[in-house]
Image (cartoon, grey):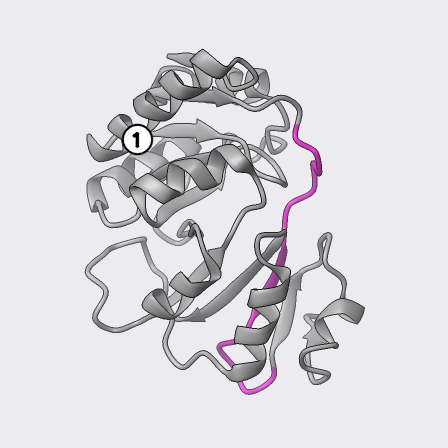
């Protein structure tokens, strides 16, 4: 099923269909502020397996997790330093993914994470509306591995087809560039992927952050 979120009636129907699909363990494609995302219930190993299979990936490339509020970070991540709390409070929602040590009590299986989790709050009304109902979602870019990230619903549907239960069309991606990835699991935080949020902005919160070589 495909829904045009620019139309009020289709938007409402699409949210209902998407949240029902997530609850049933199926996959949903939704817009974000970077590129389109392929979403599954983060706490359903079977749903996460569907996600990585649809993308043509293995367990060695676990998906990030999208959350609906910066306050949810500490439910998923252990030992969040004060500077990171300040950073995410200001920069989320936005195109910044942070890799943290995961809470050991979490009952999920995202793949070979080495006890870490990559977390982000997207700045997109459709994604946030879905997350408000579903809670944390495992979300990777809506494309087959090796293909360009989808910046339109047509791109996503062409690559993923019937493996997805619901497609939410939010129009062309406003950014089209994947998020900045910041790894905070080591003693020196490192930017693993350069993106819309640059090192100069990150240094406002912690000037020891380095670019990965």
- What secondary structure characterizes most of the magenta part? loop
Name the residue nearer the viewer: 94 or 139: 94
Is residue 92 depicted above or below 124 in this figure?
below
Q: Position of residue 75 (x, y in %)?
A: 33, 67
Name the residue nearer the viewer: 89 or 51: 89
Quadrant of res 15: top left
Name the residue nearer the viewer: 213 or 154: 154
Question: Can residue 115 be seen?
Answer: no
Residue at figure coordinates x 37%, y 43% from the top left: 132
In the image, residue 36 lies in the stretch drawn in magenta: no
Quadrant of res 49: top left
Region of the chain picked out in magenta, as a range: 173-188
Residue at figure coordinates x 64%, y 45% from the top left: 178
Rendered-image quadrant of the C terminus: bottom right
Is residue 6 depicted above or below 207 in this figure?
above
The residue where tag 1 is placed is 19
Rendered-image quadrant of the N terminus: top left
Q: Position of residue 40 (x, y in %)?
A: 33, 38
Q: Residue furthest front?
A: 8
Residue at figure coordinates x 23%, y 65% from the top left: 106
Is residue 193 depicted above or below 41 in this figure?
below
Please state if 210 lies on the left or on the right of 31 as rendered: right
């Amino acid at each position: 099923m495909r829904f045009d979120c620019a139309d009020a009636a289709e938007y409402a129907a699409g949210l209902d269909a998407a949240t029902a699909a997530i609850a049933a363990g199926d996959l949903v494609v939704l817009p974000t502020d970077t590129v389109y995302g392929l979403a599954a219930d983060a706490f359903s190993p079977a749903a996460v397996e569907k996600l990585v299979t649809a993308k043509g990936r293995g367990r060695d490339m676990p998906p990030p997790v999208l959350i609906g509020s910066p306050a949810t970070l500490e439910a998923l991540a252990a030992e969040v330093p004060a500077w990171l709390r300040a950073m995410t409070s200001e920069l989320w929602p936005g195109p910044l993914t942070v890799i943290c040590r995961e809470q050991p009590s979490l009952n999920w299986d995202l793949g070979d994470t080495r006890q870490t989790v990559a977390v982000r709050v997207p700045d997109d009304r459709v994604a946030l509306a879905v997350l408000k109902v579903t809670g944390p979602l495992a979300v990777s870019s809506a494309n087959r591995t090796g293909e360009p990230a989808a910046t339109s619903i047509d791109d996503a549907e062409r690559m993923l087809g019937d493996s997805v239960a619901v497609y939410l069309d939010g129009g062309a991606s406003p950014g089209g560039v994947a998020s900045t990835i910041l790894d905070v699991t080591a003693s020196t935080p490192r930017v693993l992927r350069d993106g819309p949020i640059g090192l100069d902005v990150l240094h406002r919160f912690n000037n020891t952050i380095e670019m990965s070589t």
